[in-house]
Amino acid sequence: MYRTFGRLALGAVTALSLMTSVATAADWRGWNIHTEGYPNTVAMERFADLLAEKTNGEVKLKMFHGGTLGSQPDAIEQVRLGGLQIGNFNLGPVGPIASEANVVSLPFIFKDVGHMFRVLGGEGGKAISDGMAAKGIMPLAWFDAGARSFYNPDKPIKTPADVAGMKVRVMNNNLYSGMIAEMGGNPSPMAFAEVYQALKTGVVDGAENNWPSYESTGHYEVAGYYSLSQHLIIPECICINTDTFNALSDDMQMKVKAAALEAAAVQRYLWTLREASSREKVEESGVKTNEIADKGPFQEAMAPVYDAYLAENPDLKPLVELIKATE
Ligand code: BDP
């Protein structure tokens, strides 16, 4: 009798200690689309190191770079569902699942990157974060992704009329499709990994991105005209599955957040350097850059995208106004 009880007790203790280790130690998996050496990749590795340091190894994050775990929309879904815990996401493809976050995908909503960070640091950023967290994907810190401009193989784009009739690749988001359609172009939503081949074979006539991605993907080799429309300034996040974050103790939450903020500071520093070095590299290889002094015609052509967004989300008008009023 005693021996049976002893064995049972021992079994219970083992089960208990197993449960404790499951509850305290965590093995997280993280998604990133970029390749080695890209500022975001370096920063996400730094985030993993900082997590291990600050939590004394209780949180172990393994990062999967280069989009090896799937496309960005799929990875966003995985983080929402908890199949993945962490992602470095661009808010473009997050917009379709969180309407507050979609505000950053309105063309020309931010005057420049400084304006974007001021908005993110205030009430606007809180509204965006809360909206995302409610959908299962919580931003811990913000990354710089510069401004996106058009590029294509055969001509500079000077006015919206130059885009008319062109098939232009966009990220998965109806606002971007609307933006191209408003200029008379044909939007073609497509995964990032497919764009190089599509440009090369003429499946699309153009695309749009920031300097570092234009360079890191080799798109500049097959689309040598880069026209500085700078129509979109979209932030990126280190994002975490909301339930995973909420299940942590206050102390652990603080450590995770601190690690993310530190990694984001690294990203922003490296980003500024990479924007300059990417531009230099592609221009040296023969890319023709076209400055657009007056962006007014692009702004006017894309303005109906705001109406469409507000018609669908009338309650978000104050958020749009708040952003516009932010100095
Ligand atoms: C890059 C973003 C990346 C996007 C990509 C794209 O960093 O998250 O997937 O653009 O255009 O600038 O799909």
Image: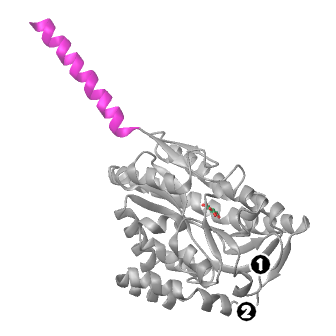
Residue 262 in percent (x, y) is at: 56, 59
Asked if the magenta segment contains residue 8, the reply would be: yes
The main secondary structure of the magenta stretch is helix
Secondary structure under badge 2? loop
Does the Cβ of the disc 1 residue fall within 8 Å of ligand 1? no
Q: Is residue 16 above or below residue 201?
A: above
Q: Is residue 187 above or below residue 296?
A: above
Q: Which mark is residue 84?
A: none
Q: Which residue is mark 1?
A: 227
Q: Is residue 50 above or below residue 57?
A: below
The residue that appears at 61% across and 61% down in the rendered structure is 190
Residue 53 in percent (x, y) is at: 53, 44
Q: Nearer the viewer, residue 304 or 124?
A: 304
The residue that appears at 82% across and 73% down in the rendered structure is 225
Q: Amino acid at mark 2?
A: Asp
Q: Amino acid at mark 1?
A: Ser
> What span is in magenta?
1-25
Q: Quadrant of the N terminus?
A: top left
Q: Which residue is mark 2?
A: 294
Crowd band around label 1 with a 10 angstrom C-alpha radius: few (<14), some (14–19), many (20+): many
Say whether marks 2 and 1 touch (CB < 8 Å).
no
Q: Nearer the viewer, residue 211 or 22?
A: 211
Residue 255 visible in this rendered orientation of the protein: no
Q: Is residue 278 left or right of residue 75?
A: right
